[in-house]
Amino acid sequence: MPSVGDTVRLQLPSLTGITDAAAPTALSSGLVAGINGSRLTVVLDKPQACPPAGGTVTLFFFAGSDFLRQQGRLDVVTLTAEELPRPILGIDRLDAPVSAESRQAFRITGFEEQVCVRIEKERNCPMVDVSLTGIAIVTRRRYPKGLVAMLEFIFQGQPYAGRARIQNLRELPDEHFRYGLQAAEERSFPGNLKKGLQALTLHFQRVQLRERRGA
């Protein structure tokens, strides 16, 4: 479970309090400021419109080397005393944390860098895994296995786009879907997607090496 001072990612309810299954997934980042039993206090990193109390929130966080998610309910929403106030969220956790990542191989977690991908017409899909030739993302929409989908993302100011084939899919319990995609041959589908996957992989490998060395 997260501790005070940990960074968490949150999928927040819409400002109306209504969850739209067709809406794109967007994540906010925050710092755990307090823990009291099952209740967390999280201060968001950036000023933004406040979600309503009473809505459901999904938390994403690390526990050691595991990447987990947990459902919660917003019970209090206040603001920091700053010129540009940030939301302070009181969250009652509703269930036990479960894995947000199933692969046991070497993983590179995209949420830590808040890399989001567009697949077809669905924007802001969080990346949860990447390799030199493949990528895993979480979506709110269902896509058929075998689909050669258009992917787009921006990393370090550089846009990348290309086609990738859905190799596997897994339905998540919170009405999301996790897809593993393999980049298509660029001779058949022009683009620079593979260059983007390589840039992401090398970047995250460097970050992880620095963390292991305590840099």
Image (spheres, rainbow, N blue to C red):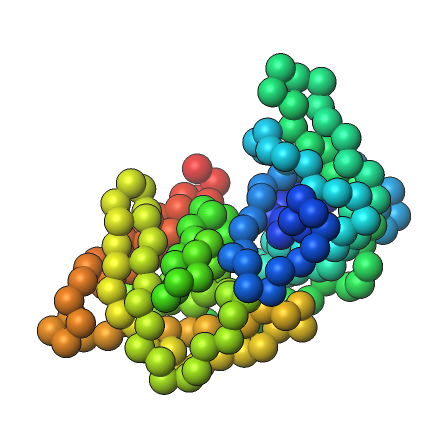
- Left or right: where 118 falls relative to 99: left
- Rendering coords of residue 91 (x, y %): 79, 46
**Is 150 placed left or right of 22 in the picture?**
left
- The spot of residue 151 in percent (x, y) is 32, 63
Give the image location of residue 180, x and y in percent: 42, 74
Image quarter of residue 29: top right
User: Which residue is painted at 26% across and 59% down in the image?
Assistant: 161
Residue 196 location (% of width, % of height): 26, 56
Identify the residue shown where x is 71% and y is 59%: 70
Can residue 63 be seen here? The reply is no
| Quadrant in the rendering for residue 30 | top right
Q: Nearer the viewer, residue 121 or 31?
A: 121
Q: Which quarter of the figure has residue 195?
A: bottom left
- At 68% from the left and 36% from the top, the residue drawn is 50
Q: Which quarter of the rendered picture does the C terminus lie within?
A: top left
Count of marks, rendered view: 0
